[in-house]
Image: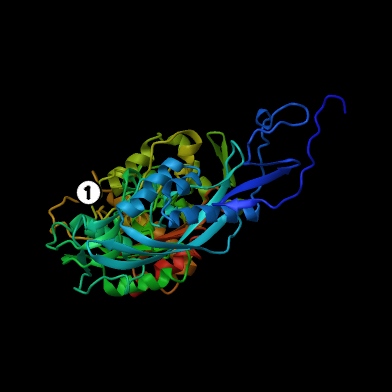
């Protein structure tokens, strides 16, 4: 072969696994040698392996890649090898901070992490450990999950880092801490003096956390020792409260009385348990007292803190605006065409229906989109925002209900987005408490800020609306809602709900969802309620039965 040297024939061998690193043994004639990947041996053409650009692997992860990556991360974490565990993620810096705090700040030791059966790229795992603090030990168990992704730069499989990998209740920026509680515990009572507990009411957890954060230091209690989630800036910006995960020693609770009605709260819990992703709130129209609030998903209080497009329930506020401006009247003819174009968007009604020669009452009862959007050219961009803020007390970020809440948002928009806002889409965002308050305002004629704890307890000031709706507007709104409850889209749900009633249905389209969120807001006598079923479909058949059942239960 001339001057070319002969390359020794390689013998096939099994790779040796050393400490999780694969070492490939290469044996040549007359010499023994080994090399880890990337050793830089010369090829036949004189180039070196290190000079060649490595091929970047792409495409879906194989089951072996998912399993191997997950096990490597969990094994390093369990062994206390934080740098190695962090290096197995796609954000080593953030992972190292939180995993270091897991031992140093949360005082969790003796951790056993057991992976479960992967589902695609997701791997569930169980956690067992011990929280040990100043001579007090308590076992800790919970379920976790991680997702494996492929790094774009080199194709390497890594754990997709998220704070929830360490504990499902953690958000990015949060920390786990064990020690003397930052605030003493509270014993929360209903309006009749009964204790509110998660054993009685499944979705009360976030409310109890909020009450403790607000009143723990002033209610007369004494802090105990506990493992808790301390919220970071991002979570606090979303009004999330610190959360107790495990009590090592009990503190002495202070007492806080709420406005919750035990019978209505129990009924609300039963109703949301029947429908996944549902939430509901009930208020007393004449006072603003919150009588019940429940969520099918107990980890987040959507009833108070949700921020969702309310769909056609927003037409109640839009109707208020149109009536005040003389752009509509309950019994006068009003356009409801099949289509209406505004801001270069072509809007239509459900199933492209139209009402010829119909009244505004008919359009409201059938939830005609174009009846509202057709009035957009006659409105200023900030008209709807002012109506929501000045009459209904929404969107000013000043409600003080006693626990964290979102006060709704009706931003000033223009062109097509302004038109969409008129029917509860665009940038409009609400939750069941907001929409229950809207029905309460229409029933009583005056906005009364909802509250869970009496302002007499801590002297806080409740939000007020800058003006009261005209009596003629209130009268017509109640006529519209009453007619809808009897003959419109809310009739089926409200069948059998007697007395002075009114209702409005809604459905809100959400990008990426096959089904819209179903909404329903209504009043009966002095009770006002609203609910949402996310990805449920039309409000009349999803959220409607939940709200109607609670109006019945309220007597």
In the image, farthest residue toward the front: 30
In the image, farthest residue toward the right: 1
- Quarter of the image with the N terminus in it: top right
In the image, farthest residue toward the top: 3
Q: Of residues 99 and 518, which is closer to you in this image?
A: 99
Q: Identify the residue at horizontal 76%, vertical 47% (top origin).
A: 11
Q: Residue 535 location in percent, x, y?
A: 52, 58
Q: Residue 476 location in percent, x, y?
A: 36, 54
| Above/below status of 371 relative to 299 | above
Q: Residue 165 location in percent, x, y?
A: 45, 54
Q: Identify the residue at horizontal 21%, vertical 68% (top origin).
A: 250
Which color scheme does this rendered protein use? rainbow
Count of numbered circles in the view: 1
Q: Secondary structure at mark 1?
A: loop
Q: Residue 249 location in percent, x, y?
A: 22, 67
Q: Of residues 472 and 481, which is closer to you in this image?
A: 481
Say which residue label 1 marks: 463
Q: Identify the residue at horizontal 45%, vertical 42% (top origin).
A: 92
Res. 196 image quadrant: bottom left
Q: Identify the residue at horizontal 49%, vertical 56% (top origin).
A: 75
The reply to whether residue 163 is visible in this rendering is: yes
| Above/below status of 488 relative to 3 | below
The reply to whether residue 335 is visible in this rendering is: no
- Quarter of the image with the C terminus in it: bottom left
- The reply, left or right, for residue 400 in relation to residue 4 is left
């Amino acid at each position: 072969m001339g001057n070319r040297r002969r390359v020794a024939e390689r013998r096939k061998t099994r790779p040796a696994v050393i400490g999780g690193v694969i070492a490939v043994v290469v044996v040549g004639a007359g010499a023994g040698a080994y090399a880890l990947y990337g050793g830089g041996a010369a090829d036949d053409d004189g180039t070196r392996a290190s000079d060649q650009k490595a091929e970047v692997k792409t495409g879906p992860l194989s089951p072996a890649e998912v399993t191997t990556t997950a096990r490597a991360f969990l094994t390093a974490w369990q062994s206390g090898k934080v740098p190695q565990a962090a290096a197995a993620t796609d954000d080593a810096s953030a992972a190292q901070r939180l995993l270091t705090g897991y031992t140093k700040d949360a005082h969790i030791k003796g951790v056993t992490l057991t992976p479960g059966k992967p589902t695609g790229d997701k791997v569930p795992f169980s956690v067992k450990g011990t929280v040990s603090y100043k001579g007090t030990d308590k076992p800790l168990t919970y379920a976790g999950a991680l997702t494996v992704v492929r790094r774009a730069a080199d194709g390497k499989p890594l754990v997709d880092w998220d704070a929830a990998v360490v504990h499902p209740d953690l958000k990015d920026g949060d920390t786990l801490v064990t020690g003397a509680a930052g605030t003493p515990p509270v014993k929360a009572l209903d309006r009749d003096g009964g204790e509110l507990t998660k054993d009685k009411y499944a979705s009360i957890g976030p409310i109890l956390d909020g009450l403790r954060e607000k009143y723990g230091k002033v209610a007369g209690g004494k802090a105990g020792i506990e493992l808790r989630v301390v919220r970071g800036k991002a979570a606090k910006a979303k009004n999330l409260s610190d959360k107790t995960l495990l009590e090592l020693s009990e503190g002495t609770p202070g007492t806080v009385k709420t406005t919750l009605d035990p019978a209505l709260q129990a009924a609300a819990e039963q109703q949301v348990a029947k429908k996944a992703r549902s939430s509901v709130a009930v208020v007393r129209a004449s006072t603003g007292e919150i009588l019940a609030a429940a969520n099918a998903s107990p980890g987040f209080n959507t009833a108070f803190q949700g921020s969702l497009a309310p769909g056609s329930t927003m037409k109640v506020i839009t109707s208020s605006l149109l009536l005040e401006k003389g752009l509509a009247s309950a019994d006068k003819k009003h356009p409801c065409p099949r289509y209406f174009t505004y801001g270069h968007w072509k809007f239509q009604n459900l199933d492209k229906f139209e009402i010829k020669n119909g009244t505004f009452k008919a359009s409201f009862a059938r939830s005609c989109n174009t009846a509202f959007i057709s009035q957009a050219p006659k409105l200023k961009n900030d008209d709807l925002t002012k109506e929501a803020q000045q009459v209904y007390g929404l969107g000013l970020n000043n409600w003080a209900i006693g626990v964290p809440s979102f006060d709704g948002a009706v931003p000033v928009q223009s062109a097509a987005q302004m038109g969409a806002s008129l029917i509860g889409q665009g940038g409009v965002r609400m939750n069941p408490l907001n929409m229950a308050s809207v029905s309460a305002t229409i029933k009583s004629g005056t906005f009364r800020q909802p509250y869970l704890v009496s302002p007499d307890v801590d002297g806080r000031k409740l939000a007020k609306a800058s003006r009261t709706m005209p009596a003629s507007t209130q009268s017509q709104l109640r006529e519209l809602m009453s007619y809808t409850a009897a003959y419109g889209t809310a009739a089926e749900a409200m069948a059998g709900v007697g007395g002075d009633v009114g209702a409005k249905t809604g459905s809100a389209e959400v990008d990426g969802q096959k089904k819209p969120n179903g909404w329903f807001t209504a009043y009966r006598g002095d009770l006002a309620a609203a609910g949402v079923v996310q990805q449920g479909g039309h409000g009349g058949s999803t959220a409607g039965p939940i709200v109607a059942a609670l109006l019945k239960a309220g007597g």
